[in-house]
Amino acid sequence: MTFAVEANFSAKLASSLLRGLDSGESPSSSTSSALSQVGELMLLQHLAYSKIGLGDARTDEVVDLLREYGPDQGIYGARVSGGGSGGTIAILCMKAALPLLYQLAKAHNTELIL
């Protein structure tokens, strides 16, 4: 499959997984499982961007760092976004993870836009 076909399939699958999830502050186990699956799809697309030459070392570092925190800290996934080649990262997280994200953005001299 080509990158575009894989990206389209991944986006449709993620959309399907996210539809109908509860929006509570503390996710149920089924919600957490769906968010983790979407996070894995995000990582696969992030890696695919790098594979076709649209990656960036700095965004790779940030995505790797966010993966280290993981679902236990309310961070389910991250990937480069926009036109690729760095600059913007989309993050799938719980609202409770926002203070951590602000702290990380400040520590890395990066702006966090919600």
Image (spheres, rainbow, N blue to C red):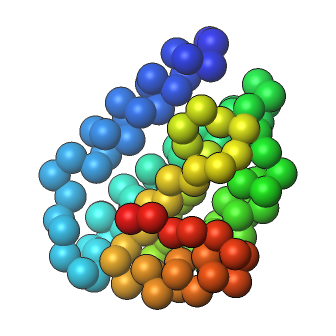
Quarter of the C terminus within the rendering: bottom left
Q: Position of residue 18 (x, y in %)?
A: 28, 49
Looking at the image, residue 30 lies above or below residue 84: below
**Does residue 5 appear to the left or right of 114 in the view shown?**
right
Closest to the observer: 112 or 60?
Answer: 112
Closest to the observer: 33 or 100?
Answer: 100
Looking at the image, residue 1 lies above or below residue 6: above
Looking at the image, residue 77 lies above or below residue 103: above
Residue located 44% across and 24% down the image = 9
Q: Quadrant of residue 70?
A: bottom right
| Residue closest to the far right | 57
Quarter of the N terminus within the rendering: top right
Q: Position of residue 48 (x, y in %)?
A: 69, 33
Residue located 72% across and 38% down the image = 85
Q: Position of residue 74 (x, y in %)?
A: 45, 77
Residue located 41% across and 33% down the image = 11
Closest to the observer: 64 or 22?
Answer: 64
Q: Give the total of numbered labels.
A: 0
Q: Position of residue 83 (x, y in %)?
A: 59, 32
| Residue closest to the far top | 1
Looking at the image, residue 72 lies above or below residue 34: below
Closest to the observer: 25 or 107?
Answer: 107
Is any part of residue 96 visible from this angle?
yes
Q: Quadrant of residue 103?
A: bottom right
Residue located 44% across and 81% down the image = 97
Is any part of residue 44 visible from this angle?
no
